[in-house]
Amino acid sequence: MEHILSLLVFFPAMAGLLGFLVAKESIRAYGISVSVIEFCLSLILWIGFDSTNAGYQFVEYYAFIPSYGMSYYLGVDGISLFLVVLSTFITMIALIGLSIEKDIKNLIISVLFLEMTMVGVFLILDVIWFYAFWELSLVPMLYIIGAWGGEKRMYAAIKFFLYTFAGSVLMLVGILYMGFLYYEATGIWSFALPDWYLLQVPFRAQLWLFGAFFLGFAIKVPMFPFHTWLPYAHGQAPTIGSVILAAVLLKMGSYGFVRFSLPLFPDATVYFLIPVAIICIIMVIYAAMIAYAQEDMKQVIAYSSISHMGIVILGTFAMNAEGITGSIFLMLSHGIVSGALFMLVGVIYDRRHTKMIRDFGGLAQVMPNFATVYGIMLMASVGLPLTVGFVGEFLSLVGFYRISWILTLLAGTGIILGAVYMLVLYKKSFFGQVVHEENRSLKDLNAKELSALIPLVLLVAILGIYPKPLLSTIDMSVQKMLVLMDQKAIEPATKELIMKANSIGGTH
Amino acid sequence: METISIDVASLNLPALLPMAILTLGALGLICVDLVVKGLNRSFLTMITILFILLDLGAVIGYNGPSRAFFDVLLVDGIALIAQVIILVASAIFLPLSLSHRHFREFEMAEFYALFMFMIVGFQCMVVSDNLILIFIGLETSSLALYTMIAMHNRAKAFEAAIKYFTMGALAAGFYALSALIFYAMTGSVEIYQIEQALQARNFEPLVGILAGTIFMLGALGFKLSLVPSHTWTPDVYEGSSAPLAGYMAVVPKIAGFVVAMRLFEMLVYSGVVWLEHILYAAVVLTMTLANITALVQEDVKRMLAFSSISHAGFMMAAILIGTTQSNTALFLYWTLFMFTNLGAFTMLWIVRHRKNLWDERYQHPYTKFSGLVKLMPATATIMGIFMFALAGMPPFSVFWGKLYLISAAINSEYIYLAVIIALNSAIAVYYYMKLAVYMFLKEPVMADATLYATNASTPLKVIVGVAVMITVFAIVFVEPLLEILTKYVSASGF
């Protein structure tokens, strides 16, 4: 168990390199085996994880460029543990459900490299390395969207790449400035996150740094008004690309908020709390309204992602344990649910080669299993109690209620609007009579698709009914982070808000 | 008249040894060529590399006082680093002559002799702080380079050489004027004495200093291809053979940077705000305009030309900042950039085809690389790595240079400069990625892989292999490089 984190990060990359030597006929089996092994490794990590220890576990540290404070520093805590498990799980499921035949070898190798960068982002504690993994994750995704995507794939891929890259170079300036501040305060260079946590940043500097990091993360999430790349990327990406993008890559941004923005700049976080919350509300309502107007099934789910990510960020900025724990749980549940929904769209697209809602209708009669799974995922997406979607959404909103009840009320309408567009989508596609003749002969889910989807359905139910094992582990690390934020805060107003946000009654 | 009596030991002749080796080598090569006809290019290449290696040995092995030869030579830390970079880049460049197809210039011994003279010129530029010796070095190297470009023997090559020559003559005039002005004001042509004299008179008259600086910026700006004296760059690169273009993007510039470092850092630290502003404007314009122009290029070689201008802009930013860290960043950046850039141009050299099959106007239009991954996966992947490295993607080579440079800017409170550098990197991604998009995402135009391999040979592949290894595993070299560079840069007081 000594080097399990390094193994987790670099196993997929090694496997990807060796994958060049595997013959084309067996590459699918190879990809699935590798992802299963990787998933098992992440499960071993979970089993070995001490859920009474709130700090970083399985830490690996090697000085790397000591004269400039860079190190190879890995560690896992309650916040990142489940995101790692989610990444390996979704990659495995996506590879199992893969239906692409063209250039499959290149595709699977790209996915394996992508997996390395995803796991790396969540596990690395050195900020320069974090940036490296963050940027590297763009390249395989660029290739996946651009090579296997739909008609306007080139445009979508380039837009995705440029948006994210532009945001993150400014984050790099922020990172280097933060390193400089650390050097000024302590006299030594360090880019290790746990070291940075101990530094009290002056208020003015916090505002600027918060802005620099915010741009990088907000574009990735994506937050309004930087969200325009997402519908294109989803619309054009192949199923596996959409699944990984929605389930994991978006979470990098929201993870960044929890890991960097909050604990490093508590005062700036509180200072910008209301503006950010308003952006979140806009995301929730505006994206839900656009989703309702879409005619393309995939676009509906893409916009619903933006809407849900709004609640995730809102929960993060609740500044209390319920909100932040809830938002991390919502990241996981959104990963499971949106991944599943994109797979389901992929299933029907493989059969009908269209994603337009008007081309369907009455699918429940010809594809009952498909309709059932779709229905369950839909309910989870809407946030029906006892499904996985409810837990995170509820906790996030409860958390933010202590900050502002009116904003929470507005965000809560997102659930209602979500129900509206999702149920309309379901009604138009699945209920009623079969109006198109070609839909009559559609085959129901086959064994491959079922084996990819059933685990997701089980997770939706199990975690919806009994989320406690996850929540308690996450909560522990979040509590620790909140204590740290409270200690670090410079402005009395920040301390007061954190105190109030964490007591019954909140700021009201 | 009193008799001049000088002790030979005080001349410190060993300091001249590196330049002497290559000069003798070049003269010897000409003599041998007179006697023996039809020397094979492999012989010429290898013998030149051997001379360069001897030179490198002499440079590294030099162990004497830093002043030599009537105080004209100044062998300090940055001179040493710059010479090592120049010589290593030259040694890597030369085997590119051993391409599969034969080119006339590489068959002639004169090319190799000129090449060695050119290196001597660069060395003279970096090991001196005497404006006259720098001038001699500048002219020696430039004249040799003009001729070598013309030897490529294409209509475009002649055009390029003439263009380079006329513009270069203008720049030389600027240089002479600037040196004249400084001499008139201070009575010296040694940079350190100029500095003392200017300080003694408190940097007055300002008009004189400004004129001197402007002319010097024009002259060095031409060599370093700073905006607005950058217009020759894309045409000259396009006209020259790909390896020579790659060489021009790296080596003459490092020599120019050292001269700029010696001169401008003295001026920036003078406290005359104007000088800093002029340099600041030149830096920002160079980075940004070159980047924006690169966006609309249709030819990969021209795109690389504009991008190299933009990289030169980053380097001038380091000189503007002027701290030990930023000067170290300059050398770190340029060392890493050297391998990646040379690698990228070598790739163009490999895929060179006799005829312009893809476009009437350009040798290497983007469409030429359409769907290359389907025809030659390894070639496309390597080219893609070079492109992402040049764009500053972590963890490839140039990223570490850029990281250190931005950090140097931030540490000296040049926050806006840091942001401008970052934004320019974001713009640059677009045109580098464009090539990657063509190679990986588009369908091939001509489905014949042999068209892309007519010029490939083992030496070329080995060079690309070395470049790609260094580009990918740059991470490993950063720490030791930083240590050495910081030591030498700070030892020479920059």
Image (cartoon, helix red, strand yellow):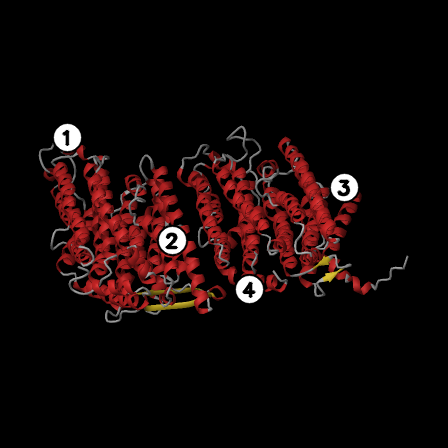
Three-letter amino acid code at the position of disc 2: Ala
CA–CA distance in space, label 1 to label 2? 51 Å
| Numbered mark located on residue A482 in the image | none
- Check the picture and name the quadrant holding the C terminus of chain B: bottom right
Three-letter amino acid code at the position of disc 4: Glu
Chain for disc number 3: B
- Check the picture and name the quadrant holding the N terminus of chain B: bottom right
CA–CA distance in space, label 2 to label 4? 30 Å
CA–CA distance in space, label 4 to label 3? 48 Å
Whole-percent x and y of residue B273? 57, 51
CA–CA distance in space, label 3 to label 1? 84 Å
Marks 4, 1: nearer the viewer: 4
Mark 3 secondary-structure assignment: loop
| Numbered mark located on residue B37 in the image | 3
Disc 3 crowd, CA 10 A, few/some/many (<14, 14-19, 20+): few
Instruction: Decide which of A497, B308 is in the foreground and name it.
Output: A497
Three-letter amino acid code at the position of disc 3: Lys
Q: Do labels 1 and 2 share a chain?
A: yes
Disc 1 crowd, CA 10 A, few/some/many (<14, 14-19, 20+): few
Mark 4 secondary-structure assignment: helix
| Numbered mark located on residue A212 in the image | 2
| Residue matched to label 1 | A436
| Residue matched to label 4 | B483
